[in-house]
């Protein structure tokens, strides 16, 4: 019985070396097929479509670089690009500062800490549609914010947060930031839990205070996690869509439209699929450049 069991477990080792090496790749086949069907094929089709004029109803017509020429001459595209940069910059506090502070707080060994982690993470698993509807009431002329400001005498007339060009984008950034802060908090929490406690104890013995330990121990050691967070934030900022669609529809005066919203409008409102694909390709290339710059900056900081 023992010999039979041993033979069964050692049977794979009796196979030819080439067959043993190919076995792990067979397990990758289902995932690779899904990746090819749902990622590679749509992406390659979109790249090809960027050089065609296609409105869904008529067959595609090859136009070469005409879509890109129209795109770079479009005022609406450059406004969306500028707005996306604004989202990128405006989301940095919700990507680095607030999540890091929350991660430090929930990394403490206190009673019911799991409850606080859940509360802070709750917006992440909540539908953005539901969040946008709730925040729409918060920003309303008769909503919570205007009610508080009127109650303490700071304003006489309500502030039109979502219809004023000076406040609309900031209002959307706050909604997006409130939604994603929990995600980055968990990233930083994972980073904090990889730092050996011995380092903090040694720094404390050397007389380092809380701020000094944060600056000289915590920040250098979670720099890779910070790079991941910033890369994800770059991609998210370029593609802000649901909050814009639900709260402002890109207004007022195109002030809140991101590149993601611009692509949606061109493709599914204007039926300009080729033109939208060209915009998507430009956005993808810009994200690659941003990611490469972020990676390079991280390597320089480590050296």
Image (spheres, rainbow, N blue to C red):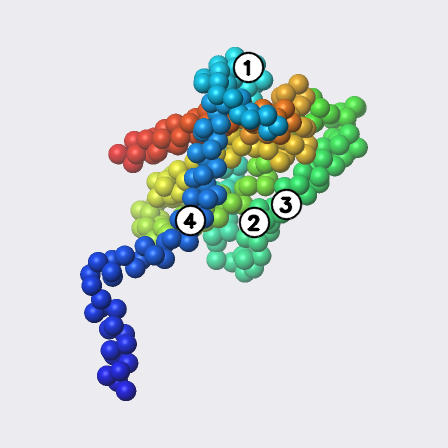
Sequence-wise first label, 3 or 2: 2
Residue found at x 62% / y 28%:
57
Residue 217, position in %: x, y? 35, 44
Q: Which residue is mark 4?
A: 33
Viewer-nearest of discs 1 and 3: 1
**Marks 3/2: CA–CA distance:** 13 Å
Q: Secondary structure at mark 3?
A: loop
Q: Residue at x 45, y 18 (%)?
A: 64
Left or right of 26 in this view: 18? left
Nearest to viewer (mark 3 / mark 2): 3
Location of residue 48 in the rendering, given as x and y in whole percent from the top left corner: 45, 28
* Label 4: few (<14), some (14–19) or many (≥20) C-alpha neighbours in 10 Å: few
Mark 4: secondary structure: helix
**Residues under labels 1 and 4: Cα distance?**
38 Å
Viewer-nearest of labels 2 and 4? 4
Labels 4, 3: front one: 4
State which quarter of the image contains the N terminus: bottom left
Q: Earlier in the sequence, mark 4 or mark 3?
A: 4
Q: What is the CA distance from the residue labelled 1 to the residue labelled 2?
A: 39 Å
Lower position in the chain sequence, tag 1 or tag 2: 1
Determine which residue is flagged by label 1: 74
> Which residue lies under the disc numbered 2?
121
Point 65% across, 32% down: residue: 245
Marks 2 and 4 close (CB-CB < 8 Å): no
Q: Is residue 33 left or right of residue 102?
A: left
Q: Of the residues under marks 1 and 3, which one precedes in the sequence?
A: 1
Q: Which mark is residue 127?
A: 3
Counting residues from the start of the chain, the first of labels 1 and 4 encountered is 4
Between label 1 and label 2, give the one nearer the viewer: 1
Residue farthest along the front direction in this orientation? 59
Q: Secondary structure at mark 2?
A: helix
Q: Is residue 138 visible?
A: no
């Amino acid at each position: 019985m023992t010999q039979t069991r041993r033979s069964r477990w050692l049977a794979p080792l009796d196979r030819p070396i080439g067959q043993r090496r190919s076995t792990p790749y067979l397990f990758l086949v289902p995932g690779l097929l899904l990746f090819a069907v749902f990622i590679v094929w749509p992406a390659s089709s979109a790249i090809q479509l960027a050089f065609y004029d296609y409105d869904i109803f008529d067959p595609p017509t090859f136009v070469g670089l005409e879509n890109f020429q129209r795109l770079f001459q479009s005022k609406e595209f450059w406004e969306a690009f500028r707005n996306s940069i604004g989202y990128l910059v405006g989301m940095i506090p919700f990507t680095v500062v607030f999540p890091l502070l929350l991660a430090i707080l929930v990394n403490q060994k206190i009673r019911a800490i799991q409850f606080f982690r859940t509360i802070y993470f709750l917006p992440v698993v909540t539908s953005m549609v539901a969040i946008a509807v709730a925040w729409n009431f918060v920003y309303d002329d008769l909503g919570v914010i205007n009610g508080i400001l009127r109650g303490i005498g700071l304003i006489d007339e309500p502030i039109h947060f979502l219809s004023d060009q000076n406040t609309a984008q900031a209002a959307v950034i706050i909604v997006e930031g409130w939604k994603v802060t929990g995600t980055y908090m968990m990233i930083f929490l994972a980073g904090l839990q990889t730092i050996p406690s011995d380092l903090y104890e040694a720094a404390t013995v050397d007389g380092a205070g809380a701020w000094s330990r944060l600056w000289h121990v915590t920040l250098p050691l979670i720099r890779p996690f910070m790079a991941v967070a910033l890369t994800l934030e770059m991609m998210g900022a370029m593609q802000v869509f649901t909050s814009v669609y639900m709260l402002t529809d890109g207004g007022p005066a195109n002030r809140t439209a991101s590149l993601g919203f611009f692509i949606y409008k061109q493709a599914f409102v204007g039926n300009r699929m080729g033109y939208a694909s060209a915009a998507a390709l430009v956005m993808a290339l810009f994200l690659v450049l941003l990611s490469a710059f972020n990676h390079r900056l991280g390597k320089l900081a480590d050296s």
